[in-house]
Image (cartoon, rainbow, N blue to C red):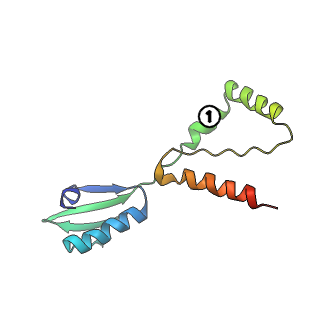
Amino acid sequence: MRGIIAADIIGFHTYDYARHFISSSKRLLNLEFETLEGGSLGVLYNGRRVELQVNHVGVQSDKISAMSSSPAVQNQARNFREEYSGLKIVISVDELDVIKGTLLKIQAFKYFLENAR
């Protein structure tokens, strides 16, 4: 904990991760966090201010949109429509990262398909 909090800025993917870090820091290092100017969380540690930031990692929709307009993708879409005519196709764009919940999405969709009437 002391090694991590020696940084000037500590970044987390989700608010839950930051919350767990704050909770652990309070218990292990007896630190109290406060809201800093600009709305981020921070703590005074060894005479310096340490800032916590939550930065969600997302899909670059503008790039996906541009790629979907390309002739190669349009051709592949046409092939899919012909090959799977009359069927529903579900597509999801995700990063293969544990925190994204990709496996849970697939399991939820499987459950839906098995239990939908």
Examine the rendered structure and indicate whether residue 20 appears above or below residue 92: below
The reply, left or right, for residue 93 in relation to residue 41 is: right
The reply, left or right, for residue 96 in relation to residue 88 is: left
Q: Residue 117: which quarter of the image? A: bottom right
For the point 70% across and 25% down, the residue is 71
> How many numbered tags mark residues here?
1
Which secondary structure, mark 1?
A: helix
Q: Residue furthest right?
A: 86
The reply, left or right, for residue 98 in relation to residue 83 is: left
Viewer-closest of 76 and 47: 76
Picture quarter with the N terminus: bottom left
Q: Position of residue 66 (x, y in %)?
A: 62, 34
Label 1: few (<14), some (14–19) or many (≥20) C-alpha neighbours in 10 Å: few
Examine the rendered structure and indicate whether residue 69 appears above or below residue 41: above
Q: What amino acid does circle 1 point to? A: Ala
Examine the rendered structure and indicate whether residue 54 appears above or below residue 87: below
State the residue position of label 1.
66
Viewer-closest of 50 and 91: 91
